Image (tube, helix red, strand yellow):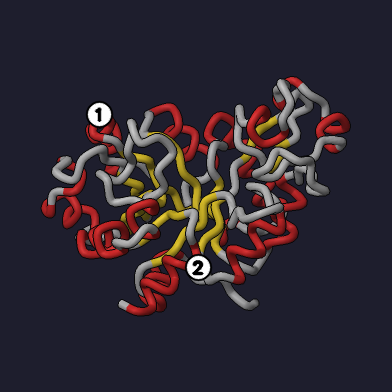
Amino acid sequence: MGKINTLKELRQQKGVLIATHRGMVVGNIPHNTFPAFEVALLHGTDIIEPDVTMNKDGEIFIFHPHQEVNQLKLDIHLEEMTAAEIRELRYVNDCRAKTEWGIPTLDEFLETYKNRCLINLDHGWDFFPEMIQKVRNHEMEEQILLKSPAKPEFFKAIEEVAPNMMFMPIIKEETMEAAAQLEHMNINYVAAELVFPVENSPLVEDAYIRSHHDKGRLLWCNTILYNYLKPLSGGHTDDVAVTGDPDKGWGWVVDKGFDIIQTDWTMALRAYLDKR
């Protein structure tokens, strides 16, 4: 692949974009592994979203924080382990059987996906300087979309160490005011992830959505349902879409004006968007 398009360029070229959550996880393939990301790319994703965590040595690995029991079937904590110890670990699959897949470092991940796709690094906000330095070491600044909760301390870190890299805050109703601080900071504020519990949330009022688009920002919606008691997209979810009503699930999100949909169902969403 040649030059990676920026987020805005890709949106103009392809329409609504797909961001695949931790890669495509089916059968024996676990989250956050190279095969999961390869399947996502094969199925037509535009953005892959790995999670990162830092261990006691200061090494950064591709792993969702605090998921050791679920993903490794072990009561351990990666942040308390050495790199050598982590390299001996293996993911389990959906049946809780051990797989051949280990936990890659961020360096290994970056080298594998350099010049291949856009990448949204999740959960790295507690160690932005170290993570961003690794991105720079691989000369991949233009390929990475950074994100964090809408908190002033994270914004300050981005302004200090990566003001030119693409950045996206995670905005909830209670953090709308905090997110507004970004308007006055030296940050490349290209997108916003809006997390809304109900469909009449102020976050999805037409005027609020228009206020972002008028400033050239894209809007990201997470249609994954982690917990039905804590909806992220006002009931318009992957579950609704893939069990018979894609117009209510994904279509509502598209019609509302979102530019990027984060999903666990890349192939089905790609087929739906292509049909639309």
Residue 156's place in the image compared with 104, above or below, is: above
Residue type for callout 1: Glu
113 or 233: nearer the viewer:
233
Vertical comparison of 36 with 149: above or below: below
Q: Which residue is mark 2?
A: 267
Residue at the (50%, 71%) spot, across then down: 5
Real-space Cα distance between discs 1 and 2?
Answer: 33 Å
Dot 2: what SS?
helix
Residue 183 lies, with reference to residue 251, above or below; the image says above
Nearer to us in this view, 187 or 200: 200
Disc 1 or 2, which lies upstream in sequence?
A: 1
> Circles 1 and 2: CB distance less than 8 Å?
no
Q: Horizontal placement of 27 versus 200: left or right?
A: right
Position in image of residue 155 (x %, y %): 42, 35
Question: Which of the two discs, 1 and 2, sits closer to the camera?
Answer: 2
Q: Amino acid at mark 2?
A: Met
Closer to the camera in the image, 218 or 23: 23
Q: Position of residue 113 (x, y in %)?
A: 68, 62
Which mark, by number, is residue 273? none
Local crowd at mark 2 within 10 Å, few (<14), some, or many (≥20)? many
Q: Which residue is mark 1?
A: 174
